[in-house]
Image (cartoon, grey):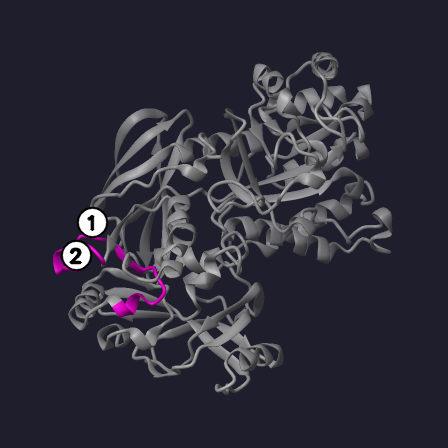
Amino acid sequence: MKHDHSLLNRPRQAASGNGAILVIVNGAGGYWDRYMIEETVLLALEHYGMPYRVLDLASEQIAAATLKECAGIILAQHHLGRGLTAAAATLIAEAVRNGVGLVNLDNDLQEYPSPLLEIFAFDGINPHPFATNLIRIPTNGHYITELQCAGEYHQFKQPVTGTIVEKWRQDVVPLAEAILGKEQLIYIRHMAPWSAFEPRNYAILFAANWGKGRAVQFTLNPRVWHKAFFGHGSGIDDLFWRSILWTVRKPFAANIIPPFVTLSVDDCSGRHDFRYMDLAVKNNYVPLIALFLRLVPERLFPQIKEGQQSGKVQFSTHALDYYTLLAFNFGRGECTPEELEERFAYDAAWWKKVGTSPGATIRFHWGEWGVQSLPYCKKLGRVFFCPAVQTGLHDTDMNLSDGFWPYNLQTCYYDYLPDDPDFFGFASLGPRHQEDFLTGCTANLRESDHTNIEKAAHNAATQISHGLRSAFYGEVLTHEQKIGALDMEEWDKILKTAAGSTKSFEKIFVGHDEIARYLKGKAGVTLEKSSVDGTKLHCVVSGATESPLRLSVFRNEGNSVSREYVAVKPFNGREELSG
């Protein structure tokens, strides 16, 4: 059954202008190479808000005029080189030399005409593919790898093939490497017994300057960007989108999410009299405190009212208590109408007694929320779910392989709820076992015999970097019972240490309601046209947003890239912008 309202089915729109990216595919290629493009490349460009259009070699020839009128080129499909003539390859190489960016995701270099290999001066290309499930980022001194940690490893869900290149031009920079160790050698010798590889690290990501232009070559199979293998939202998205931003001709505009950062605390009843909340604010956060209503002492009501009304803190109903959810019978199923009336009446009376109203973002307990409760939530204006999960289902029955736009994930997404498009869900989480950054770091449940400040700060920094690397937002998440095992000096030190560990990231601290409204507005807006005239940029955005947005404009700054913002006011229809 089709999700009529879900963004999973949002139509693609080709962008015009010389500030757009040209995505080259080959409709005459093999089906299993073609079908990957939508999920691995086009959805990513939609999420990044980068203007693009597609050129299909099966129906259109590459022309110099076509290449001249784009900011960058993405060779998006495996075995694409088979469809490129030497003349077409020469035109692409000349376009790069004249300032057009190039990102080649296709690792089948044996198929490529020499003009494209000359951009990197590749030589010693092994005709036999190797396979790996592990890559390493040796250093982070380049713009493309700047958000990674030097020496960081990433392990895939299953191996992908890669191409070994032994030589390249001296000024070409290798940025990431594949690991071919004992485990990987055993695998590939079984899959390709005629091949013998030296166990070592092999470069799989290259950056090059070529004339006036820049180029990037990945030598891992582009299937690595599919969630079955590793996928987006898994820790290396920045290598993908920053490769594009480094290469494209500038200035370049994108409707990409600003680097928002926030903090949420679940299962709250007021431990430490909410002093942890005040310290979070002092460390720049706008925290969301999700409350067990029945467990909060009345003496703390003034703090809730003051925090909520000041805008420095946000509060929401998490549940009535640990086992009494607001909108679902915990572990059993949908509430009856009578139960919903009773629970929402209690909720309304509780907030009235506090003297304020919660924000529009719902953080529910245990991930269970009934479909029958949606009209009650809508009446109260609580229309944003963070996270959304799968409404109406017992937690055990949820299929976490089914998710939301853009990547069909349950970790990183922003999308309308299929049950009712008046609701909008969003999340920016790591793997499920890493959701709480204090897990294993405190004496809570004897997870540790001491407070491990260094580990906790590292986990918090990892949550921030995971979201921002994925071009989503950074969310630091924990539960109040774990904070309850800390003293406030330890809590403050954890937040400060995490901030120091992420100082290379641009961060904009905001609350969940602002993030929710922004994501909904971004989802409704397309960068329809982007044109560059020298250093000036002219854009046309279409769609509708009720919230102000920030269009990102990227410019070259030496060998790096700078970012600035152009304000987009709420609109409905089309708006013209210049920067």
Q: How many marks?
A: 2
Residue at image mark 1? 18
Any magenta on residue 317? no
Q: What secondary structure is marked by label 1?
A: loop
**Residue at left 44%, top 69%?**
220
Q: Is residue 433 left or right of residue 121?
A: right
Any magenta on residue 68? yes
Q: Is residue 215 left or right of residue 521?
A: left
Residue at image mark 2? 68
Task: Give residue 13's position: percent from left, percent from top.
Answer: 29, 40
**Residue at left 52%, top 30%?**
418
Magenta span of residues: 58-82
| Alpha carbons under labels 1 and 2: distance apart | 8 Å
Task: Give residue 465's position: percent from left, percent from top.
Answer: 56, 53
Q: Do tag 1 and tag 2 residues touch (Cβ < 8 Å)?
A: yes
Report the front residue among 451 and 158: 158
Look at the picture and state if 33 lies above or below 371. below
Q: Amino acid at mark 2?
A: Lys
Q: Compare marks 1 and 2 and give the one earlier in the sequence.
A: 1
Q: What secondary structure is marked by label 2?
A: helix
Q: Amino acid at mark 1?
A: Asn
Report the front residue among 536 and 215: 215
Residue 1 is at least partly visible in this image = yes
